[in-house]
Every structure is written in C-alpha cells, then in structure tokens.
Image (tube, grey):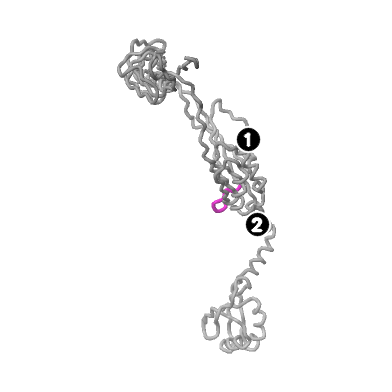
Amino acid sequence: MKIPTLIYWRGYVEIAVRNGHMESFINELTHAGISVWDVQPSSLQSANMKILVEDFHDLRPLLRRTGCRVHVMSRRGFPFELERLKKRRFFAIGLITFFAILLLLSSLVWEVKVIGNEKISKDDVLLVAKQGGIYPLQWVYRVKHLDKLSQQLNRQLPGTAWVGVSRQGTKITIQVVESAIPEAQPLLSPRHLISRTDAVITNIYAEQGRPMVAKNNRVKKGQVLISGLLGDTENSQPVVAKGEVKGLVWHEYLIEAPLVQKRKVYTGESKDKSYLVLGNRGIQLWGYGKVSFEKYSVVIEQDPLTWRSTKLPIGWMTEHVMEMEERSEVITLEEAKRQGLDGAIRDILAKYGSDSKIISRKILHENTENGKVYMKVLFEVEEFITEELPIVYSQGE
C-alpha cells in the first residue's frame, strides 16, 4: 500500500497481527480506509505491518470481527520522541537553552574589522561606521544593506576612493581603499654633494650638476663631488645637485667575542593554566597557584568554538608555562672569531646602508685573554659617500 505523507511527524507504530482470519482483516482495513504499509506476511495467519498512531485505536472493532490479535513491536516518530523528552525534561530544557543562547550569540555582531587604511585613522572609520549602524553587539538583522553602507561610508570618509563592507557570520569587515594623493615634493635649495669621508671613487653618476671627480680618484672628507654651480666663474647658475657616488672606505673595528656563551633551554617541566574565554575576558578554571619556576616562558594556545566557518566569542585558552634555564656553552676560537666578524659586518650594513659591499677585511691584531678573543680588523667597504652642502649666494652676484 502507499505510504502516507509526513509519517515521522504524525507518528507510526510497527505491529504484528496474529491468529484469526488475516485475509478478512486486510479487507476490513481497506474498507475502513485505514492506511497500512510494509506489510510482510510471516505465515497464513500472521503478518507484520506499519500503521499511523491516529489509526491505531480504530483497529479494535476490526480485530473483534476477524478474531485477530495485535502486538506493538516498535513506536517511531516525533510524538514518541516528544514523550521521551518529557520524561527527561531537565535535559530537554538545557538543550533548548543551549541552542537558544547559541542562536542569540550568532545573531549579534561581535567584531568590526578595518583593513586597508594607512593614512585614515581606524577610530575615524569605526566612528562613521557606528553612525551607520555598524558596531559590536549590534543585531545582525538590523544591519542595513551592505551596498548602501559602502556608499555611505565612502561619502562620509574623506580621502577614500572606495569602501567595501562584507559580513561573515558575526564579523563585519570594512575594507578601505585610500585615494592616491601625490606627495608634495619638498622645495630644495641649491646645493653641492660632498664626500662625508676619505675614500677612493668607484662609481659616479651625476643626474643634475657638474661632476668634479672621476673613477679611481682619491677624495678627502668635505671635498665637492658633484657641484651645484653650472657655468663659469662670471656666469654661474646654482642648481640642486643630484646623483650617486660610491667609493671605497676603510673602517677599523675593535672586536671582542666571548669563548663561553650562555643560552636558554627548556628543562621539560611545565605548568598549564586553563581559561574559559567569553568575548575579550577569560575566567581561569584550572592551574591556580604561584609559578615555582625561577625562569620561564609562556606559550598561549587558543581554541575558540566555531559554528560552520564562524568563530564564536566563546572558547578555551591554555597558557603553557615552561621552565627555562641558562646553560654555558664553550665554542671554538674560530667560531668566536666568525661571530665577532659577522657582528661587525652587520653594524657596517646598519650604519652605511644595506647596499654597502664588503670588499675585503684584514685582521691587524689578535689576542686571546680572560676567556675572550680580541681583534683589530680593517674592513674595506664600497658604500655611498655623498652628503649635502647648501650653496650660500646673494641675488646680486
């Protein structure tokens, strides 16, 4: 027979009909308009079948007329599930409360993130967004159409070329594209480019001005490299000298490197502190007590609850407090020298530019004393050597 609609929500039972006239019982069911399905005869006088709960009590007169007996084998469907929940009412109330809270939390805006802004203050963006109804703890259904919000923010935020608003779960992201405003070029006074140190010229490029030296020339500190005066002594025109000049410069370093070095290592001892995280606050649940380690480091592990791809403002956080201790390590003389030279090279690159090039190095003096190696090293470095010198002149000249 045809299976009725919505059998789960209406509820049904699986019954076993025994004894009596089974053929007459089936005919009576058809005549009474009672729907049964999955009829499985087990013998000439018995069969298993399924019937709706609402039709079950209508079987009694049919059973009397046909002499059959019925036994309920199983009860299925929503009415029976609801009856079971009534017996476990506290569990049902807790389950419903949990999903209600989850639905409530997922219906609020928990985070408003601003990206792409460099010159425009984040606080200014959030203030304008709040005026448009975008702020934490706002109901999601009260947020206006995102395209309209984008246009409103673009109008109210000066200096923006485009503003986009997108929502993912409980987080709203405001993406700002700032207008490309060309930077005002500073007004430069006429100047020379001079050497800031003694050097040997390796390369010179004069973009503007008159070069005064050539490659392989030795120059002194303060010597003019690119002149800002064009013309002769009688008819000269001051300009802003521009260009690049590289030269070989010598730097003498006194290097001190220890042979015994201290480093921090983990001992393997640790202590964990566990927190329940609600929004931006954490409630400590385990791991109370003072940390007994003299030296330690803390590693934080966060595990927020997620619903689909959305992070909820509820989660778990663990602080791993790991004990550390200092250990001394003896290194070789060559390793100490290498570390000292590397430190000097890093200092040169930091002072004179990362594009500086170490051409050669020479150890002038070396001595080992009191667990340290002392070196005097001369570095030959190719670097930019120019600095500016303003040109002072009078209008009458």
Q: Reply above or below: 129 against 250.
A: below
Q: In this rendered view, identify the residue nearer to me: 298 or 128.
A: 128
Q: Are marks 2 and 1 in contact (CB under 8 Å)?
A: no
Residue 260 circle label: none
Q: In this rendered view, identify the residue nearer to me: 69 or 229.
A: 229
Q: Taking the image as drawn, is residue 344 in sight?
A: no
Q: Which residue is mark 2?
A: 95
Q: Which residues lie in the magenta part?
A: 305-313
Going by the numbered disc 1, the residue's amino acid type is Tyr
Position in image of residue 300 (x %, y %): 55, 37
Secondary structure beneath disc 1?
loop
Q: Taking the image as drawn, is residue 268 in sight?
A: yes
Q: Reply above or below: 244 against 141.
A: above
Our reading of the magenta stretch's main secondary structure is strand
Is residue 355 on the magenta stretch? Answer: no
Position in image of residue 100 (x %, y %): 66, 55
Residue 288 circle label: 1
